[in-house]
Image (spheres, grey):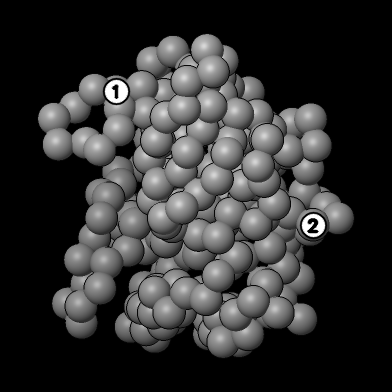
Amino acid sequence: MRYHTPLVPARFLGRYKRFLAEVELSTGCRQWVHVPNSGALRGCAAPGMEVLLTQEARPGRKTSFTWRFCRVDGQWVCIDTLAPNQVVAENLAGVGLPGLPGPLAARPEVSLPQGGRLDFVVSHDGRLLFLEVKSITWVEEGVALFPDGVTSRGRRHLQHLAALVGQGYEAWQVFVVQRGDAHLFRPAVGVDPAYARELTRAARSGVKILVWQESVNPPEITLASTLPFDLS
C-alpha cells in the first residue's frame, strides 16, 4: 500500500490522549495530530523522535494531520493500525498469503452470529476462511511483541477464531510487524499473560498463526517476509 498524500516531517513532542499527540513541524509550529493507534506504542513515542504525517482536511476533524511513521534506531516504523489490513487485503486480491494462493475473494469487517467482528472472510476452494489481523510496532532485541497493552478485545477475537475452527471452518490469526528489525515473534507475556495463554489455546485448537514482516519505505509499505514465532 502507499500513502498518496505528501508526507509532512515533524518532531514528536508528546502523546496526551490515546488518539491525540503534539508534534513540532519543520517550521517550528506546534500541531495536534491524530494517532491512528490505540496501543501503548512502546518504543515508538519518545519525545524528539522524527515522525511523518499526512494532512487531510475533512469536516469534523479536530486536526487535519495524522501521524503515520516514526523513525526508531535509524529505520521507519509504521504506527497506523489500519495499514496492515490494507496490505493484507491487497495481497489477498493479488498473490495471496502463504498457504492461501491468490487472487482470493475477501470480504472485510465480518459480523459473527454470536456477536463480535473479524477482519476478513475469504472464499477459497469452495470453503470459507476467517482472518483476524493485528498490528505490531513493538520490537525488543529483534523480538516482535504483542500486545503492548492489555487487550480483552484481542482475547475475544482469538476465542471467536477457535470457535469457528470447532464449527469446521479454517481460521487464521495474522500478525503484521510494521518494521523491519524483527527475527521472531512472541506474545508479550509480561504485559498481558491472559492474551498469551489464549493465543496458545487458539493455536492448539487449530487456529493458524501467520506472522508477516513489512518492508517500510515511506510512503510505501509492502509485506516482505514471514517470521517464525514462539508461543512457549
Viewer-side label of 2, 1:
1
1 left or right of 34 in image: right
Residue ranking furthest to the left: 59
Q: From this view, report whether residue 139 is shown above or below residue 58.
A: below
Tell me what residue is drawn at x 63 percent, y 85 percent: 193
Q: Which residue is mark 1?
A: 56
Percent across and percent down for residue 106 are 30, 47
- Number of numbered discs on residues: 2
**Closer to the camera in the image, 7 or 162:** 7
Position of the C terminus by quadrant: bottom right
Q: Residues within 10 Å of mark 2 (few under 14, many from 20)?
A: few
The structure residue drawn at horizontal position 25% and vertical position 55%, both measured from the top left corner, is 109
- Residue 220 found in image quarter: top right
> In the depicted view, which residue is nearer to us: 212 or 217?
217
Q: Position of residue 87 (x, y in %)?
A: 46, 37
Q: Which mark is residue 23?
A: none
Amino acid type, callout 1? Glu
Badge 2 element: strand
Residue 94 image position (x, y, % from top left): 43, 31
Marked residue nearer the N-terminal end (2 or 1): 1
Q: In whole angstroms, how far apart are the C-alphas of marks 2 and 1? A: 33 Å
Q: Is residue 10 above or below residue 6?
A: below
Residue 140: mark: 2
Q: Nearer the viewer, residue 192 or 93?
A: 192
